[in-house]
Image (cartoon, rainbow, N blue to C red):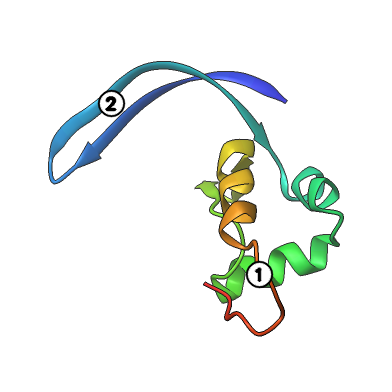
Amino acid sequence: MRKQIAVIEMVAGETIMEGNVVEDIDNTKNMAEYLNMSQSWARQARMRGDGPPFLKIGRTVRYRKTDVDEWMIRKLRKNTIERAC
């Protein structure tokens, strides 16, 4: 789902980025399908802290496609001996 969201990023009390950004924001089901994984895996990875970054607004969990893509890039390995991040 494409939504336009206003972004204000704060670091140490300073605004470092402000403006409207068009971002792909999706729910757990669609994110899991994108990764070809189960929703159960996505929920467990979120609880363990080793899944893609997510947004929590109230009781709703959402994922930005750019965050999921960057998370996948960090998971790239050249062989099975390499340790995960």
Q: In this view, does 55 lie to the left or right of 10?
A: right
Q: In whole angstroms, how far apart are the C-alphas of marks 2 and 1?
A: 29 Å
Q: Which residue lies furthest to the bottom in this view?
A: 81
Q: Residue furthest left?
A: 13
Identify whether 26 is placed above or below 33: above
Residue 27: name its quadrant.
Answer: top right
Instruction: Characterize the local packing of mark 2: few (<14), some (14-19) or many (20 or more) Cα atoms within 10 angstroms.
Output: few
Residue 12 is situated, as x and y percent measured from the top left of the image, at 13, 46
Q: In this view, does 47 lie to the left or right of 12?
A: right
Q: What residue type is labelled 1?
A: Ala
Locate the N terminus by quadrant: top right
Q: Which residue lies furthest to the front in this view?
A: 78
Numbered mark located on residue 17 in the image: 2
As helix, strand or loop, the secondary structure at mark 1 comes to: helix
Numbered mark located on residue 45 in the image: 1
Identify whether 5 is placed above or below 61: above
Q: Which amino acid does label 2 sit on?
A: Met
